[in-house]
Image: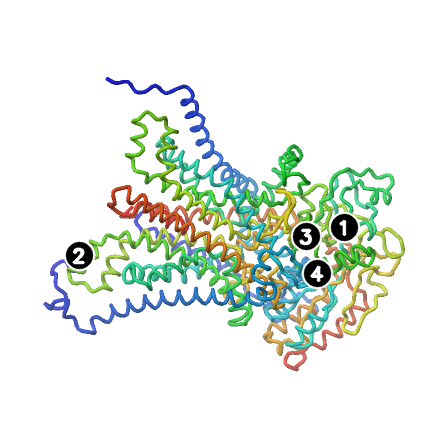
Amino acid sequence: MEAHTPVIGGGRSALERSPLARLPDRVLKWGLIGIAGGVLVLIAYFFVRLIGESTLALDRFGVLGFTFHNRWLPSRLVFGAGAMVFGTVVTSAIALVIGVPVAVGAALYLTELCPRRARYPLTILVDLLAAVPSVVYGLWGVYVLIPKLKPVEQWFANTFHFLPYVAGHVAGPSIFIAGLILAIMILPIVSAISREVISTVPPEHKEAALALGATRWEMIRMSILPYARPGITGGAMLGLGRALGETIAVVLVIGDDPAIPHAIFGQGYSLAAVIANEFGEGQNVPIYRSAMLACGLVLFVLTLFVNGFARAYVLRGERKMFAAAGGGGTQPGESEVEAAMGV
Amino acid sequence: MSTSRISAVVLTAAAALGLAACGSSSSTTPSSTGSTAKIAPATIDGAGSTLAAPIYMQWASNVKSQGLTVNYSAVGSGTGVADLESGTVDFAGSDPPLASADLTAIDKKGKPAQFPMAFGAITVSYNLPGVQTGLKLNGKVIGDIFDGAVTKWNSPEIATLNPGVKLPSTTITVVHRSDSSGTTDGFTEFLAATNPTFAKKIGSGKLVPWPSGETGAAKNAGVAAAVHQTSGAVGYVEQAYALQNSFTYAAVENSSGKFILPTIANTSAAAVGLKVPADLGLVAINSSNPAAYPIVSQTFIDVYKDMCKAGVSSSAAKGVYDFLNYAFTTGESELGPGSNQLPYAPLPASLLAKDKTQLATLTCNGAPLS
Amino acid sequence: MTELPHISARRRRTDKIMRGLLAGATGIALVPLILVIYYLIYKGIGQWSVKFFTTDPNGNFLGYPGGIRSAILGSIEIVALASLIAVPLGIAVALYLVEYGKKSLFANVVRYFVDVMTGVPSIVFGLFIYIVLIASHIGGNFTGWKGSLAIALVMLPIVARSAEVVLNLVPGSLREAALALGAPRWRVVTRVVLPTAAPGLLTGSLLAIARGAGETAPLLFTILGANALTLNLSQQMNALPLQIFNDITSPRNAIVARAWGAALTLVTLILILNLIARAAQRRSRMA
């Protein structure tokens, strides 16, 4: 940038630049528009192709029939993915039930109660869970988690056998273990988003509660949680979205049984896992291949819905915070939230 | 450190790694060790049977020094044949002979050639502390276990066959293949032939509707690992995997009423006196030989008769020819019961001769490859 | 001086219990991390040796099963190509959204579609590349570069999202000052906006690369895997996550041990990328 003269082009006003000098501007602008458009076309093509390839199976078995009917018989070319949908949903639900309270609790501790010096290192450690790739979680799950938890699970199944869906033989790989590993995998996302949301609670709210004599926990309960609830819910749903699509860790520990298990410690299947295991065989049989892609489509639509809800919730929460914060300054949390969602 | 410094470090590291890679990549100087045929450098891709994967991977390792790179992906017989049909691999490893449905699909690209390569016993391996190898089982009992009718190890069906063996009261954890598998095909064929209820309920094939409540694992290795890790588990595992990990496995009753252990000798016995059809698509399950282990699976390498016409490059076609030639000359001698041999039963001489004859008929766009 | 209201013992107890629970939650959150790292090191470090990093998996049935050289180098190549595709494209999309599109309809549609892309399970991207490129035999069969494309699809929305956030943080005043001084738009972008945002862009890109390096599912149907070392991206290649995945289900203890060593290698590489990203973030002029 020239510092010696504020005028470019030998004394002419910038508005009078020749068309040739405007060329780089045009090139940049239209080049970027082209790239953005190209990405759009790519995603649209992806969607169209996915739906197109799934039509065969969805027509043959009906959209609802394919998605909810529990009858997966590749040898007879009958495909109803009910058990896989069940497995996907249940493992993700387990992941939420276990993971969200832990993540939110940790987020609360780290933002509100943690001694200042420990805050940064502990935060980094919790975030580090996100750096472990899925296949390593799978390895650890198969050789550490499953053998170590098996006696505990068997004890639990025997002691609480009167509870529904608990009794039965524990073989090792199970829906529960898959849910547990998913819980670990969504911890960093939910925790990061919760931390951001919690840290944007206006200090006045917190101080008001404390000034009125509330204990720390009461302050958290009265001032922080209600305020942060939409954002935290949004974060939980983003975690759910991540859990739904997780393939590799799940396929290694879920037991690969295309049926609805009788107990939480029984084996099951998930949409992503069945694709990983059976796509190779089915690639050339048209109805089989279509069924595999239909599984991918169902999975994709599920995550679409969940992510859509999440965004709506997070945005709603932010608008509330924005308004409450007086309507000034930059949007709190959205940048970090978005960054966390992307990573 | 400023951003540019960091970028510089990253780039230098990447460059260093790249240089190391270039420096250490093996230069292909084919060393003629006096082996039977001269092999031209090539890269060939194959996929399929996990039963035979240890064989092909060992052979691949052996021919590497001569410049032939063989990439074999053990993805299961079903996927392997499917890959061959779609033309994404040069050869497929398949345990079952090509079925009519496969043949119709393959015919779109050309006629296939099946080469029987070896025989492997499918063991019924179990993980029962305190119970040794040699538990006596027959097709009826095994079928009942695998279709869920028999659930505990000390049930009467098993106990009557094994008087004097102390059986624990553990629940049986059944492990089966979750991917499309030639091993499943061989195993279920045997069960369907010896257990009518099993034949009706489950049937036979590469993918069968196993009853719920059982554990699925991908590939022979996966089933082996699952059995290895779960006390009380039983699974059907190829002999090589079972022997390598010192599994305990059953002695299965064959068609002559004898309880036979899956040793290499008993596996080879199943290959004797087999009916060999013209396209070499033989089946070794439930052999009538009284000394044979009843659950012996054959395994094939499938290629197109005219590979280049089917889409394979000419160098890859020559590579496949060389690989098969190696297999039929040197490779077969590496299979057997010896301590540094691969634990599979090699082809009997008559079958080997048939393979060599068929090998000579492979062509590339009409020109013979030999 | 008014006294503060007296806090009952019950409330004090509840407070203590809940604070303990929250601290406990943090502890619980850290337990898996500690266990994973512990076992990775405990089982994996023994595998690390010169032979481990300089030999390929050899497929030998007996004896030493080989190291992971082809996997590491294959991963580096595949991820490098994927980054070369995804990072510039992602930043370009973000640049468009921030500098030109802003809140227009087209820009919002692009934003929405990029968001949608983040939610696609990575295995579905692998399927897409398989159907479009491999089943149709375009450019060969299973090849390394098709795996790169699948991974690039996973990385693209991540890069675009984080780049958009970073570019939005560049103060408008900087842009306006440059424009007021007569600089053409393209100069403002290349000489003012991009350099200011560079540390943040680097962070976002490195995190996306770390994510791409750990992905297995997109590779299952695109590169298929190989034992032998090849640096030729138009052939079947090996990759570290794929190697680990295949080794996990092996009944041979030696191969499972190799999986642990490979896992430790992969996590170490990813951690290094993460640390560099964090260092860049701390140096950011806008942090």
**Residue A305 falls left or right of residue B46:** left
* Chain-order first, disc 2 or disc 3: 3
Q: Is residue B245 above or below residue B110?
A: above
Q: Chain of mark 3?
A: C
Q: Is residue C185 visible?
A: yes
Amino acid type shown at disc 4: Lys
Q: Nearer the viewer, residue B74 or A342?
A: A342
Q: Residue at 41% across / 59% down in the picture?
A: C156
Q: Nearer the viewer, mark 3 or mark 4?
A: 4
Q: Is residue C196 above or below residue C136?
A: above
Q: Which residue is mark 3?
A: C62
**Do circles 3 and 4 both sit on a common chain?**
no
Amino acid type shown at disc 1: Val
Q: Residue at 42% across / 25% down in the picture?
A: C16
Amino acid type shown at disc 2: Ala
Residue A22 x, y percent position in the rendering: 21, 70
> In which quadrant is the N terminus of chain C drawn?
top left
Q: Which residue is mark 2?
A: C177
**Do circles 2 and 1 both sit on a common chain?**
no
Judged from the image, the secondary structure of the residue bearing numbered disc 4 is loop
Q: CA distance from mark 3 to mark 4?
A: 29 Å
Q: Chain of mark 2?
A: C
Amino acid type shown at disc 3: Leu
Residue B25 x, y percent position in the rendering: 52, 61
Q: Nearer the viewer, mark 4 or mark 1?
A: 4
Q: CA distance from mark 2 to mark 4?
A: 70 Å
What is the number of the mark on residue B124?
Answer: 1
Judged from the image, the secondary structure of the residue bearing numbered disc 2 is helix
Q: Is residue C51 visible?
A: no
